[in-house]
Each structure stands twice: as structure tokens, then as C-alpha cells.
């Protein structure tokens, strides 16, 4: 069954540490997205990708990097984690164009 | 810019009562955006609830309905009789972009609490 999976599901990190969140999709979609979800803000776009090897900045990219090594995988990297990055992170995949996206279950990240 | 505004939650409704969650949008980058409602149940990711890509059309799923109204730039979510299992967070989203670029703009989400 086509799906978007994320790992880890929960992560506790220390301030200044490096965190990598991973996403895998079997939908064969070209586009992939990373969002964070905070109370009162809905989902905010961090980075996205049009295909393997491409990454683009979203609305709130500061403090985050992204990597798309293959069609299936898209990672979000926090080089120096800060408490303000404590949030729930969602990965999604979608076909080209303004169409629906399919979401993973989310990763709850706590930075102490 | 492109943006979505929806009913601020939480919204508390008794079981079997009717529900409306308001959603209005602003689309400056595209004349006819696609419109979506997503739902997030506790502990799960977002699921697509319904979508409408043609102005004037209505989408429906699981008893929920929403009509794409371009004149009022609205896409309100309605249900005639809610159930306890409908308790979740609902997000209205605006789909914009061309043939390659596709992105969604989300509202802040509306938490629905259904009291049995």
C-alpha cells in the first residue's frame, strides 16, 4: 500500500545537537514537503523538493536543511537544534501541480 | 499573498447536532485555486477529507460537505449530524502552483470536540 512513513516518531534532542528526520514515500510522487505544526499556526512549510537532488526553501527555512537523495527519501536536518524547534514535523508527498498531498504520521521533536 | 483563515477552535458540539467550520481564502498567485479539507485524528497524520477543484462545485465525504464559492472566497465545512468519532482537528487548505510547483497553504486548524 502506498504510504508516507517517518522516522523517528519521537525524538528528544539537546540544544546544539544535530537532528535528522527521515521520510520515505512509496507513492512515486515527484514532490515532497516538510512542515512543522505548532498550535495556532497550522502547518508551515520548511523545505520542499521537486525530485531527487533538488531542494527548495519554504516559508520558514532558517535553521533547517533538507536532502533528497532519491525519489523515495527526503530528510530534514537540524545542524544545531534549539528549543524553538520543538514541534511536530510532518512530511508529505504530492504529484506535480496544486494537488492534494499525502502525509506521514508526524515526528514529535523535543529540544531540551 | 495566498492565505487561509478558518474558525478558531476549539469548537464544542453535542453529538447529533449540526456543525459548520468557516474557511475563507485569499488567492493572489492563481485565479482558481484548488481547495481542500484535511482532518487529523489524535496520534495520526493528516488525512484528506475532501477536495474541490472547480468553482461552484461541492465536495462531500463521510457526511461532511463543502462548496467552493469563488464570489465569497469561502469553503465552509458542514455536517448535519456529528458523531463522537468526528472529534479531531480540521484544516482548510488552498492549493496553488503551476505544472511543477505545487504547494498547499493551510489554515491554523480548528479543533472539534464532540460531546456524547
Image (tube, coloured by chain):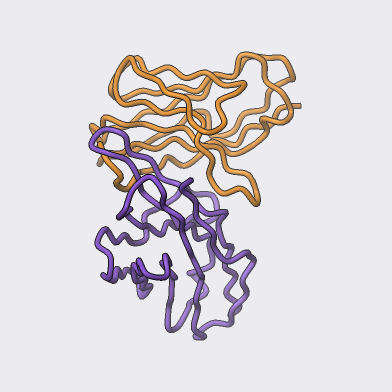
Chain colours: A orange, B purple
Q: Is residue A42 above or below residue A16?
A: below
Residue A14 at x, y = what percent? 73, 20
Q: Measuring 38% from the left and 72% from the top, which residue is drawn there?
A: B64
Q: Which quadrant of the structure image shows residue B76?
A: bottom left
- Screen quadrant of the C terminus of chain B: bottom right
Q: Is residue B44 left or right of residue B49?
A: right
Q: Measuring 68% from the left and 14% from the top, which residue is drawn there?
A: A17
Q: Is residue B69 above or below residue B99?
A: below
Front residue of B3/B114: it is: B3
Q: Is residue B8 above or below residue A24?
A: below
Front residue of B70/A49: it is: B70
Q: Is residue A82 left or right of residue B93?
A: right
Q: Measuring 41% from the left and 28% from the top, which residue is drawn there?
A: A48
Q: Is residue B101 left or right of residue B5?
A: left
Q: Measuring 35% from the left and 18% from the top, which residue is drawn there?
A: A54
Front residue of A33/B13: it is: A33
Residue A89 at x, y = what percent? 54, 36
Residue B108 at x, y = what percent? 57, 54
Q: Is residue A61 above or below residue B24?
A: above
Residue B81 at x, y = what percent? 45, 83
Front residue of A83/A44: it is: A44
Q: How many marks?
A: 0
Q: Is residue B73 left or right of residue B32?
A: right
Amino acid at each position: 500500500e502506498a504510504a508516507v512513513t517517518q522516522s523517528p516518531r519521537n525524538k528528544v534532542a539537546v540544544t546544539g545537537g544535530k537532528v535528522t528526520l527521515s521520510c520515505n514515500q512509496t507513492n512515486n510522487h515527484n514532490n515532497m514537503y516538510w512542515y512543522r505544526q505548532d498550535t495556532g499556526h497550522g502547518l508551515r512549510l520548511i523545505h520542499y523538493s521537486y525530485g531527487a537532488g533538488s531542494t527548495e526553501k519554504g516559508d520558514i527555512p532558517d535553521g533547517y536543511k533538507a536532502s533528497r537523495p532519491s525519489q523515495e527519501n527526503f530528510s530534514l536536518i537540524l545542524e544545531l537544534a534549539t528549543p524553538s524547534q520543538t514541534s511536530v514535523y510532518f512530511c508529505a508527498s504530492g504529484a506535480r501541480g496544486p494537488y492534494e498531498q499525502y502525509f506521514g504520521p508526524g515526528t514529535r521533536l523535543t529540544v531540551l | 499573498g495566498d492565505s487561509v483563515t478558518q474558525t478558531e477552535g476549539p469548537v464544542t458540539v453535542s453529538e447529533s447536532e449540526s456543525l459548520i467550520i468557516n474557511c475563507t481564502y485569499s488567492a493572489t498567485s492563481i485565479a482558481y485555486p484548488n481547495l481542500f479539507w484535511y482532518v487529523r485524528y489524535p496520534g495520526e497524520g493528516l488525512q484528506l477529507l475532501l477536495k474541490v477543484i472547480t468553482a461552484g462545485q461541492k465536495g462531500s465525504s463521510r457526511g461532511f460537505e463543502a462548496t467552493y464559492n469563488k464570489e465569497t472566497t469561502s469553503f465552509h465545512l458542514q455536517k448535519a449530524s456529528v458523531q463522537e468519532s468526528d472529534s479531531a482537528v480540521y484544516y482548510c487548505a488552498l492549493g496553488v502552483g503551476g505544472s511543477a510547483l505545487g504547494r498547499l497553504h493551510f489554515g491554523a486548524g480548528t479543533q472539534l470536540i464532540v460531546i456524547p
